[in-house]
Image (cartoon, grey):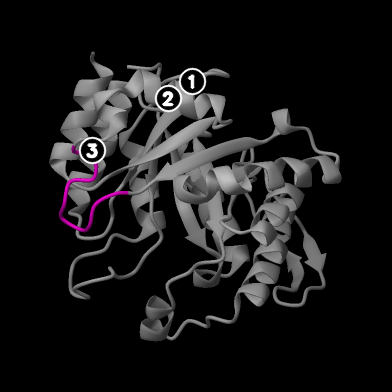
């Protein structure tokens, strides 16, 4: 299998989004531990409160899960794929992420985006304005998070999130990298402007890659300073996501292809115990 630990220009690091919808918490954490031991680069958790189908299936909360994962793993990176900016006030997200960074010993990546499942918002009474406002909130939220990660005091005006003498100790050291989840031209411009990288989806990545690179150039930001992470979905709740996947059947060739396309890391989806078994076996080849 391609090197899953360090990454290279022609071989992206390989991380895994462990399904949190319909998942048992102990299984999720044991899966993260197994991926850590197998040498994978990241264990990522979704930010959902309900599934697309049966609303009664268990759904793990993202940040509680990541905090627990930080405590039961040693080396693997952990990350949010991706946090919905509408679900939490960014000042509280800054504190939560800073705490997880401390628990993990500096292994956290904060992926954050504008959200997209209106049904969840309606069910929970969480505002879900149009995409333009959610994007404006995201950009302001990133500024709030970065400001609070200095420790404070932070006083700043804001259209959505004004602060008045806010402190946030302990300061995360180092501050987590912020990836902006984006699947539109406006989104990749925001990622280039405000993020430390781009959390992309495989289905839209190639069509947006050049726009992202152009936006970075327009901002005067070198590509080498950013991290591009491409996510691969698959399957439905309770179904295998990786059966027959080229990432399992031909991992070296598949990794080489996506490295050539510019991915620094890929995030595969694992929904079942069989998916985790496949990943562990692939790493041992």
Q: Which residues are magenta?
A: 234-243
Q: Position of residue 143 (x, y in %)?
A: 73, 58
The kind of secondary structure element at disc 1 is loop
- At x 41%, y 55%, the residue is 63
Q: Quadrant of the N terminus?
A: top left
Q: Position of residue 65 (x, y in %)?
A: 34, 52
Tell me the CA gap for discs 3 and 2. 22 Å
- At x 39%, y 82%, the residue is 124
Using the rendered view, name the quadrant where residue 247 is placed.
top left
Mark 2 or mark 1, which is nearer the start of the sequence?
1
Using the rendered view, name the quadrant where residue 16 is placed.
top left
Residue that numbered label 2 is attached to? 255
Which of 21 and 229 lies nearest the eye of the viewer? 229
Tell me the CA gap for discs 3 and 1. 24 Å
Label at residue 31? 3
Q: Relative to 119, does residue 101 appear above or below in the rendering?
A: above
> Residue 241: within the magenta?
yes
The kind of secondary structure element at disc 2 is helix
Which of 79 and 274 lies nearest the eye of the viewer? 274
Residue that numbered label 1 is attached to? 11
């Amino acid at each position: 299998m391609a090197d899953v630990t360090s990454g290279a220009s022609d071989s992206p690091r390989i991380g895994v989004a462990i399904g949190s919808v319909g998942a048992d918490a102990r299984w999720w954490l044991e899966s993260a531990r197994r991926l850590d031991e197998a040498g994978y680069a990241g264990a990522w958790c979704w930010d959902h409160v309900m599934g697309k189908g049966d609303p009664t299936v268990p759904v793990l909360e993202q940040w509680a899960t990541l905090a627990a994962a930080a405590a039961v793993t040693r080396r693997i990176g952990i990350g949010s794929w991706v946090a919905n900016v509408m679900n939490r006030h960014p000042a509280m997200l800054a504190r939560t992420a800073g705490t997880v960074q401390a628990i993990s010993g500096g292994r956290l990546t904060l992926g954050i985006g504008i959200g997209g499942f209106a049904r969840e918002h309606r069910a929970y009474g969480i505002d879900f304005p149009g995409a333009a406002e959610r994007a404006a909130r995201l950009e302001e939220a990133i500024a709030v998070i970065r400001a609070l990660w200095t420790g404070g005091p932070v006083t700043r005006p804001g259209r959505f999130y004004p602060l008045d003498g806010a402190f946030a100790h302990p300061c995360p050291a180092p501050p987590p990298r912020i990836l902006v989840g984006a699947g539109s031209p406006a989104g990749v411009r925001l990622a280039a402007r405000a993020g430390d990288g781009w959390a992309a989806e495989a289905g839209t990545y190639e069509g947006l890659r050049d726009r992202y690179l152009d936006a970075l150039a327009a901002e005067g930001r070198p590509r080498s300073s950013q991290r591009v992470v491409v996510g691969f979905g698959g399957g439905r709740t309770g179904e295998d996501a990786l059966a027959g996947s080229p990432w399992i059947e031909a991992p070296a060739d598949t990794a080489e292809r996506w490295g050539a396309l510019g991915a620094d890391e890929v995030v595969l989806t694992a929904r079942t115990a069989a998916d985790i078994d496949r990943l562990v076996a692939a790493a041992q080849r």
